[in-house]
Image (spheres, grey):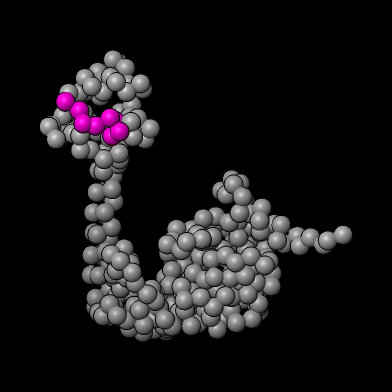
Amino acid sequence: MMKINLLSIFFLLGCMAIPIHAAELIKIEGVTLIDDEWNDGDSIQVNAAGIKRRLRLYYVDCPEADVYGKAGIARLREQQNHFGLEDLRRVLDFGDRAADYTYELLSRPFTIYTSYASAPGSSSGGRFYAFVETHDGKDLGRLLVTQGLARIHGKTRPAPDGTPSDIVLEELQDLRATAMLKRSGIWSATNPDLLTELRKQQRQTDQEIKALSASLSKTLSPDDPPLDLNRASSKQLQRIPRIGPVTAAKIIAGRPYQSIQELLKIPSIGPKTLEAITPYVTVTSE
């Protein structure tokens, strides 16, 4: 009879559609690092129980090692401001150092703890959040913060040993404070005179983005300028009360419109719905 690798089964089950928020951490030992060009300090490709996966560390964010597109540059600038660096290129230098440090620590088989919670990223196969424990039982995220090669930033959850997330954060903050005082890693390049001002600028930028995002996603009010039925995007149409993604798609498919009354040709829009949404829309000629 063929033997079944239980770790592989657990890993496969973890990739299925289960309630991630309720999932417990699964421990997988004997994990090895895959040499991959996209590896950096906090995001790595691994072989776990015979399955290739990309992992993203909980709690920490290392400096970028490579930058692609406007979003990457914005993230690089955010890290520059957090660490108080005069030269943006230093972020990339320390990103390379963080990647090398992680590669060195994971040169021997290690242990991961994951619940397969999806982590954002541009990798084609997706990423999972995980805790990574080196071969000698040390947490990779804590080591990166201790060396001044990561900031405290990202998704949190209780640690594998059950330590609550708020306590983990406090412990990481202590490690960060020590790294700053020792001028370890990227903190060695920090300009103390710029740190406060750069972080202030970043907070202002974050607030502006948050306010813009909220204004774009909020429900329209009758006082807002009406949306053009022939030009509004799906997201804009969904800001209208009673309009969801399905109805928005039907409205777009029914273009062009000569009058608002033509919305009645859409099965999901009756006289009462039309009356409710009329204050929010208008029609202009194509």
Question: Residue 18: x and y, percent?
Answer: 61, 46
Q: Is residue 169 visible?
A: no
Q: Which residues are magenta?
A: 251-258
User: In the figure, residue 275 lies in which quadrant?
Assistant: top left
Question: Residue 68: x and y, percent?
Answer: 33, 69
User: In the figure, residue 195 lies in which quadrant?
Assistant: bottom left
User: Compared to 263, does 6 lie above or below?
Assistant: below
Residue placed at 51% from the left, 55% from the top? 118
Number of callouts: 0
- Residue 273 sits inside the magenta stretch: no
Question: Residue 157: x and y, percent?
Answer: 54, 57
Name the quarter where the C terminus is drawn. Answer: top left
Name the quarter where the N terminus is drawn. Answer: bottom right
> Farthest top residue?
271
Question: Residue 137: x and y, percent?
Answer: 65, 75
User: Compared to 149, does 8 lie above or below?
Assistant: above
Residue placed at 32% from the left, 23% from the top? 266
Residue in front for this viewpoint, 141 or 121: 121
Residue in front for this viewpoint, 215 or 231: 231
User: Compared to 155, does 230 lie above or below?
Assistant: above
Residue in front for this viewpoint, 165 or 276: 276
Q: Main secondary structure of the magenta part?
A: loop
Left or right, 106 with respect to 188, comes to right
Q: Is residue 113 visible?
A: yes
> Farthest right residue?
1
User: In the figure, residue 87 lies in which quadrant?
Assistant: bottom left
Left or right, 135 with respect to 169, comes to right
Residue placed at 69% from the left, 73% from the top? 30
User: Compared to 38, does 277 lie above or below?
Assistant: above
Residue placed at 24% from the left, 49% from the top? 212
